[in-house]
Image (tube, rainbow, N blue to C red):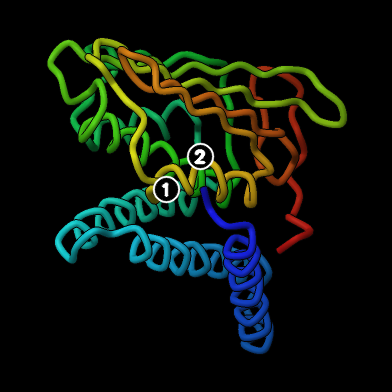
Amino acid sequence: MTDPGDMAEQLAAVRADNARLRRLLNEAGMPDSLRHGVRNTTAMLRTIVRRSAEHAGDVEAYAAHLDGRLNTLMRVQATTDAFGEADLHTLISDELMAHLVREGERATITGPRVRLRPKAAMVLALALHELTSNGIEHGSLALAPGRVTVSWQIEQSDPEPVLALIWKEAGGSEVTKPTHRGFGTALLEDMLAYELEAQSDLTHEPDGLRCALSIPLAARIGRSVDGEAIQAADDDRE
């Protein structure tokens, strides 16, 4: 488990970095939309580099994992730059396909249409990258019969609806909980909570990992396209 004191220091460092970057961009006179985009991407890059180094076992592993995480970030950045938002289904299928896990073959993806704001899309895409990488390196997707089902629904709640997403692997054999807490676990349990106010539940079942995420679908996070649209709004914490 992470020491509470260390966690508080890490969160304070992230907030301090964001504050410094905010001042620099304000002084540069950038338009609001561009300023938010640059700040979000730069802050995310800093977090990925720092956290990857903290959890890397050696230089080669650090380089390989960092490259994959940055590729995910850049892919989402290109999408949100072009369309302003990211479609959740596409976000999932693209990440799986980047690891040669094809929908309709080894992956099933199902849920209502949801569009995510840029920052939320980046954070969730990184979580999906860690789940996919872990499944291929250590979980069910390392085996030929291994499959994954990613499903979600919108649950009505107060004050905003909740995006309930489940990642469920199957076809594995004697999957066990890792002996140490790596970058992926820290991201799923800590970064999602900090950035998206999400709750996560990781269960290492015998045939594969099950990850349940509960994310408040506030305006700064995204909107349900099938239901009543949620008006986009800026993140007050930014």
Q: Residue at x 32, y 25 (%)?
A: 176
Task: Quarter of the image for the C terminus: give it.
Answer: bottom right
- Estimate the x, y position of residue 126 in percent, counting from the top left: 42, 45
Q: Would residue 230 appear left or right of 203 to someone viewing this image? A: right
- At x 25%, y 10%, the residue is 171
Residue at numbered disc 2: 86
Q: Which residue appears farthest toward the bottom when viewing the image?
A: 27
Viewer-proximal residue among 158 and 210: 210
Which residue is identified by label 1?
76
Label 2 Cα neighbours within 10 Å, binned few <14 / some 14-19 / many ≥20: many
Is 77 placed left or right of 163 in the picture? Answer: left
In the image: residue 179, left or right of residue 238: left
* Amino acid on which the number 2 mark rests in the picture: Ala
Q: Is residue 92 left or right of residue 101?
A: right
Q: Amino acid at mark 1?
A: Val
Q: Residue at x 49, y 16 (%)?
A: 151
Instruction: Answer whether labels 2 and 1 touch (C-beta < 8 Å).
Output: yes
Q: Looking at this view, is 71 or 1 the one in front?
A: 1
Which image quadrant is residue 134 in? top left
Residue 159, quarter of picture = top right
Measure the alpha-carbon separation of dots 2 and 1: 7 Å
Above or below: residue 181 compared with residue 114: below
* SS category of the residue bearing label 1: helix
Pick the residue in front: 56 or 220: 56
Q: Is residue 181 above or below residue 134?
A: below
